Amino acid sequence: MSGAGGRTAAERGGYPWRVTEPGTHTEAEQEALLANEGFYRALGNSDMGAMENVWARLSPVTCLHPGWTLLSGREDVLESWRTILANPNQPRIVGGGASVTVLGNAAIVLCREVVSGSPLYATNIFVREEGSWRMTHHHSGPVMVHRPE
């Protein structure tokens, strides 16, 4: 994907996945992106109530934080977020650059995260539950960003 100055996102030190222009998403895609934004808003505001609302209640949930082992089950996943959100030394986490693919009642959101200046990629998977998109899986990990020479 080329952009500014004809260079690819990787060449600009950016993130190489497609980010579509505003207004080009279907209604389902827009709703899934809003659910993803809700996740990062809950995280940024250390709002455990909002975080609980983000996660699926009927579908199985899993979470893989950077450097952690896989967490399975709503209670274990939410307990990990309680620990993270209650930590006064927790670095700010910012999400952005999201792209979305909707496959029936599932949505896959790929986005970047920045934690203390370090880039990460995240995969957030949502499912439709009772008319709303709810997160069923979050996986975030560090990446190497190519720097032009």
Image (cartoon, rainbow, N blue to C red):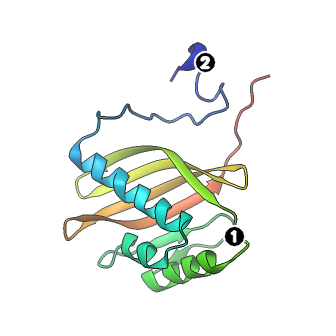
Q: Nearer the viewer, residue 110 or 91?
A: 91
The disc label shown at residue 22, or none: none
Residue 64 relative to residue 67: left or right: left
Image quarter of residue 91: bottom right
Q: Is residue 23 above or below residue 85?
A: above
Label 1: element kind: loop
Q: Residue at x 54, y 54 (%)?
A: 122
Q: Residue furthest front?
A: 45
Q: Is residue 113 above or below residue 49?
A: above
Q: Residue at x 20, y 71 (%)?
A: 130
Q: Residue furthest top?
A: 5
| Residue 111 place in picture, x, y as percent | 51, 48
Q: Residue at x 45, y 63 (%)?
A: 39
Say which residue label 2 marks.
7
| Residue 94 place in picture, x, y as percent | 58, 54
Kind of residue at disc 2: Arg
Image quarter of residue 89: bottom right
Q: Nearer the viewer, residue 20 or 127?
A: 20
Residue 70 relative to residue 149: left or right: left
Kind of residue at disc 1: Gln
Gap in angstroms between the C-alphas marked 2 and 1: 35 Å
Say which residue label 1 marks.
90
Q: Residue at x 42, y 51 (%)?
A: 109
